[in-house]
Image (cartoon, rainbow, N blue to C red):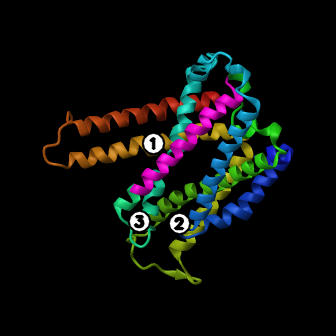
Amino acid sequence: VFQVVSGASSSMRQLFVVLVGVLICGPLALARHVSFMRHLAAWSVLFLMLLVVVVVIFLAENGPDESLADISKFWFGSGAVSIFAYMNSANNIVFAYNNQFNVPQLTGELTPEPTVKRMSMVGIITVILCFLLFASVSIFGVLAFGVGENQLNSLVLDLRPMGRNPLVLLSLLGVMLSVLTCFQFHVYPIRQFCGFAERKLRGRAVEEADVEWKGRTVSRWIDMAVSLTSVAIVIVIAVVVTSLKTILDFIGAFASAWISFVVPALWQLQLLRRREGFSWVHYKTLGCLALLGLGIFFFVFGTYSAIIAAE
C-alpha cells in the first residue's frame, strides 16, 4: 500500500515497514487487553466499506472490463489457471474467516458481563458483515478489473493508476490501517499461548499471584518480551517477502486451516468420546470427521499449493 500511495522504491518500502513496526506495531502489541482496539477495528471496517464504494465508482465510470466480453468468464475465469490457483483462493478465504483464536479473549472482555449468548451474537454479526464485504469486493472487483492478465494480485495494485485520486488515496490509507489492526489481533493469541506455557513451566496456576520485579509481575515482563519478539520476527518477514498474497496463501493453508478445521474437530471428537454411548457412526461424530478431513486437505494440499505458487 505504501508503495502504491507514495511511489517509493523497494528500499524505502523496507525502511517504512521497519519504522511502522517499531513505532506503531511494537507499542500497540504491549497493551494488556485486546478490547482497547475496538474503535480501531470499527474504523478499519468502515474504510474497507469505502474501498468497496471506490471500486463501484470505478465500475460505474468505466464499465465492465473488456476481458468480460464473454460473460461466462465472470463465473469460470479465463480458463488459463491451474488447480493450484483455485486452491490458493481457498487459502485466502480460510485466512479471511480465521478468528477463532481471538474469541476466548474477546469473550472474557465483554462488558458488563461476558456470556455465550452475547458472544454468539457478536460472532453472527461479524461473520455476516465479513461475508457481505468479501462478496461485494469479489463481484465488483471482477467486473471492474476483469479476469486473467487484466486482474492483478490485489485491489491495491488494480487501483494504482488512480492512486492520486483523493477518494482512492483515502481508501488505500484505510486499508493500511486495517492491516495494522489485523496484525495486532494476531499477536494476542501468540502472547496468550506463551503466557500460559511459561506459567505451566514455572508450576504456577493461571490465577495464582506472581512474583513482582521492578513494579511488574514476571509474567507481565515475559508477556512484553514475547510481544516485541513477535513484532520483530514479523518485521523481518515483511521486509524479506514483498508479496502479501504469498504470505496470506501460506498462512491460510498452514496455520489457519489447522486452527479453523483440524483442532476444533479433534477437540470435539475428544469430548464426544468421553460421553456414554459414543459411536463412530453417529451423525455428530461423522460431521467432526468430515470437518477433520477437510482441514487436513486444506493443510496438506493448500500448503503445497502455496509453496508451488511462491516458487
Residue 311 in sight from this viewpoint: no
User: Does label 2 or label 1 sit earlier along the sequence?
Assistant: 2
- Residue nearest the viewer, comparing 168 with 179: 168
- Give the residue drawn at x 36%, y 36%: 291
User: How many neighbours does mark 3 have within 10 angstroms: few (below 14), some (14-19), or many (20 or more)?
Assistant: few
Type of residue at label 2?
Ser
Type of residue at label 3?
Lys
- Give the residue drawn at x 75%, y 52%: 170
Q: Position of residue 180 (x, y in %)?
A: 66, 55
What mark, if any, has residue 171 been given in the picture?
A: none
Position of the C terminus, as image quadrant, is: top right
Mark 3 → mark 2, Cα distance in angstroms: 26 Å
- Give the residue drawn at x 77%, y 48%: 167
- Give the residue drawn at x 64%, y 34%: 140
Label 1 secondary element:
helix
Q: Is residue 135 magenta?
A: yes
Instruction: Select label 2 or label 1 by which is in front.
Output: 2
Image quarter for residue 149? top right
Residue tagged by mark 1?
258
Q: Are marks 3 and 2 in contact (CB under 8 Å)?
A: no
Q: Are marks 1 and 3 in contact (CB under 8 Å)?
A: no
